[in-house]
Image (cartoon, rainbow, N blue to C red):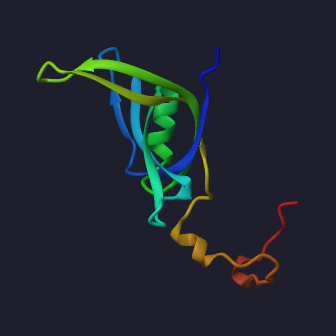
Amino acid sequence: MLNNIVLMGRLVRDPELRHTGSGTAVASLTLAVDRDYKSQSGEKETDFIDIVAWRSTAEFVCKYFTKGRMVVVEGRLQVRDWTDKDGGRRRSAEVVAENIYFGDSKRTVSDSDTHPAGEITEIPESEEGELPF
C-alpha cells in the first residue's frame, strides 16, 4: 500500500506551535494550493489543506516559516474521526508532514541592497584588507 503526498503552496498564516502533555512539539499550518485549472467563471480555485508536523519538524517550521512563504510538504494523508462539543460525529483529513522544504528564496529587506549579478562595485579603502584566500 502507498500513502504519499507532495504539496507545494503558500502558508495561509504563521505556523502554530504547541506541545503535548508529554512535551512533544506539534505544529499546525495551512497551505493554500492553487488548482491547475480555472472554474467555469474563469477564476482560479484554491484548496486550503491542513498540515500537522511533529517533533523537530514542527520546531523547524515554526522557527523559519511565516505567512505567505512558499512551502513544499512531503507526508501522508491521515483521516481522523472525532466527536464535537455537541456530541456530533465528525471526520477530518490532514496531511502529516514527514519533510518540509522551502519552496522559494528568503525575502528580506536587505535583498534590495544587493547588487545584480555581474555588476562590479568598488570596495572603499576603509574596508580594504587582505583577501581571505
Residue 68 is left or right of residue 118, and the answer is left
In this view, which residue lies farthest toward the right? 133
Q: Residue at x 43, y 30 (%)?
A: 94
Q: Nearer the viewer, residue 98 or 45?
A: 45
132 is higher (above) or lower (below) than 86: below
Report whether 84 appears left or right of 119.
left
Residue nearest the viewer, comparing 103 with 113: 103
> x%, y% of residue 17?
36, 35
**Residue at position x 79%, y 72% in the image:** 129
Residue located 76% across and 84% down the image:
121
Q: Whole-percent x and y of residue 6? A: 61, 37
In this rendering, would 42 be left or right of 132? left
Question: In the rendered image of this protein, does residue 75 appear above or below residue 113?
Answer: above
**Where residue 132 appears, x then y in whole percent?**
83, 61
73 and 41: which one is in front? 41
> Is 40 above or below relative to 35?
below
Q: Within the image, what quadrant is residue 84 found in?
A: top left
Question: Residue 131 in the image: x percent, y percent?
Answer: 84, 67
Residue drawn at 46 percent across, 53 percent down? 46
Q: Give residue 23's quadrant in the image.
A: top left
Q: Residue furthest front?
A: 40
Q: Quadrant of the C terminus?
A: bottom right
Quadrant in which the N terminus appears: top right
In this rendering, the count of numbered labels is: 0
